[in-house]
């Protein structure tokens, strides 16, 4: 296939790129996604403080999380398409500047209406940052190490799941919720500067190439349906994982009867399993091919959901081990599939990764909603089996339908 992504050369490319190097770029990408994820998860423990500040209920304050997520999901596809036209580096820098300003506005908001508007702006800015970083990492990575590079970048977001809430709690206890957002704004400004130097001018832009085959011509005209059906796999994966994870604390406490200390230990083990699984998923994809890793991860995820449901009635050590194993087999899917998307859609990577992020949020939200319905109507024990079925569906969708045949390339590429 002749159509491929290239970085346009510039006078500073050789010096800057060599100075920063692959490790430097990965470090900047990792910290950038860590900051974006932290901004989302840091809000939850701050909601009571925000509610007290404006004289509203905690539930009303929670709308700040909702509007951020909605703005992200709505904005991602449009900003991703813009990145394909203007260049991912340009959109990344603009997004980080917008993210800085939005968080600063959040920190100084005089009333709750202004705070909601600031969170909408933060969600829109984040929707330009995350897929742009992922696309730049995927494009810049050597073909034989693309999975590993994507995994390192993704690990930044995964770690934010574990540190976001504790960070918010710690800062709120020492200072106030306003300083939390002002601090994230300052970090975003620093990251904007770092990303300017990390990615040389022209990084992430598409160099036109005349299609040589029917398959290459098809890549030039990737339609909306092609993008949406491709990222459906990510949505199904997120549904399968987060329908259970959202209520795992409830299950550990009410079904397994664990104390607060053991619940914290179990969630810590889960977080370690998620990070290790993600990093190993990238390496496995580079070695054995992304398709094998995606399908294997989804099938094992289904099996572990069933076993984990049984483990809630097993000894505590067995349950905690099963929870860690659940994360370990589930999270290799994400970086492996992101690597596959970069390879399959080289000329529209920005918009495809944006749709991928959108569907991950959508799958997470729908999974949490479905889990809540099952918890209240049928009981906690029904959540894992439903997630297991959805994971198997994800494997089937990937194998039979997700990627258009004429854009698909060798899975090991």
Image (cartoon, grey):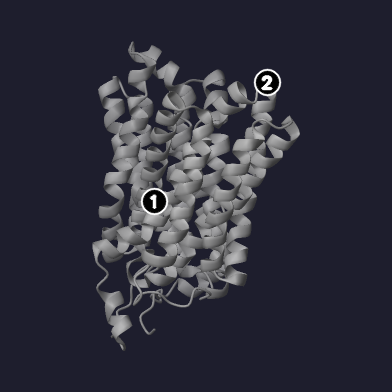
Residue 251 higher or lower than 159, as above or below? above
Q: Position of residue 268 (x, y in %)?
A: 65, 36
Furthest residue toward front: 378
Seen from the viewer's position, the closer of residues 348 and 140 is: 348
- Distance from the alpha carbon under mark 1 to that under mark 2: 35 Å
Q: Quadrant of residue 292?
A: bottom right
Q: Under tag 1, what secondary structure?
A: helix
Residue 367 visible here: yes
Q: Residue furthest bottom?
A: 212
Q: x, y percentage for residue 3?
A: 35, 80
Pinpoint residue 353: horizontal percent, then vertical percent.
Answer: 38, 58
Image quarter of residue 186: top left
Mark 1 crowdedness (10 Å alpha carbons): few <14, some 14-19, many ≥20: many
Q: Which residue is mark 1?
A: 357
Q: Nearer the viewer, residue 221 or 87?
A: 221
- Front residue of 291/72: it is 291
Residue annotated with mark 2 = 259
Q: Residue at x 57, y 74 (%)?
A: 144
Residue 200 can be seen in this image = no
For image coordinates 66% across by 36% down, the residue present is 311
The answer to whether the residues at label 1 and label 2 have Cβ atoms under 8 Å apart is no
Specify the quadrant of the image occupied by residue 80: bottom left
The x and y percentages for residue 171 are 54, 25
Which badge, 1 or 2, is on the more N-terminal residue?
2
Front-most of 5 and 303?
A: 303
Up-down: is 43 above or below 407? Answer: above
Give residue 33's mark: none
Q: Is residue 391 above or below residue 105?
A: below
């Amino acid at each position: 296939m002749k159509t491929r992504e290239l970085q346009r050369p510039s006078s500073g490319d050789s010096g800057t790129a060599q100075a920063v190097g692959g490790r430097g770029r990965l470090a900047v990408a990792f910290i950038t996604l860590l900051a974006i994820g932290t901004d989302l998860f840091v809000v939850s423990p701050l909601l009571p403080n925000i509610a007290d500040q404006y004289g509203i209920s905690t539930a009303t304050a929670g709308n700040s999380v909702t509007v951020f997520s909605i703005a992200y999901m709505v904005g991602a596809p449009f900003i991703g398409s813009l990145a394909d036209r203007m260049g991912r580096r340009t959109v990344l820098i603009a997004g980080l500047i917008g993210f800085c300003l939005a968080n600063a506005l959040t920190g100084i908001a005089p009333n709750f209406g202004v705070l909601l508007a600031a969170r909408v702006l933060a969600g829109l800015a984040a929707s330009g940052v995350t897929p742009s970083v992922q696309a730049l990492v995927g494009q810049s990575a050597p073909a034989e190490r693309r999975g590993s590079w994507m995994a390192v970048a993704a690990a930044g977001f995964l770690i934010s799941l574990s540190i976001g809430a504790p960070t918010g709690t710690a800062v709120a206890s020492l200072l106030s919720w306003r300083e939390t957002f002002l601090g994230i704004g300052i970090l975003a400004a620093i990251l904007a500067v770092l990303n300017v130097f990390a990615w040389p001018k022209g990084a992430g832009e598409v160099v036109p190439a005349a299609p040589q085959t029917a398959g290459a011509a098809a890549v030039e005209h990737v339609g909306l349906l092609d993008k949406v059906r491709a990222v459906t796999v990510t949505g199904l994966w997120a549904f399968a994982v987060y329908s259970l994870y959202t209520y795992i604390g409830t299950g550990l406490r009410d079904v397994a009867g664990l104390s607060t200390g053991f619940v914290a230990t179990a969630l810590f083990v889960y977080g370690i399993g998620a990070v290790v699984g993600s990093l190993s998923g990238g390496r496995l994809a580079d070695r054995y091919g992304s398709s094998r890793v995606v399908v294997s991860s989804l099938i094992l995820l289904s099996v572990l959901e069933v076993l984990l449901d049984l483990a809630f009635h097993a000894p505590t050590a067995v349950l905690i081990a099963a929870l860690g194993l659940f994360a370990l087999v589930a999270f290799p899917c994400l970086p492996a599939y992101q690597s596959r998307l970069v390879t399959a859609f080289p000329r529209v990577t920005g918009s495809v990764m944006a749709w991928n992020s959108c569907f991950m949020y959508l799958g997470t939200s729908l999974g949490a909603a479905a889990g809540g319905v099952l918890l209240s109507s049928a009981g906690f024990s029904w959540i894992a089996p439903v997630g297991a079925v959805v994971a198997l569906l994800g494997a089937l969708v990937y194998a039979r339908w997700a990627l258009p045949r004429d854009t698909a390339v060798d899975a090991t590429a």
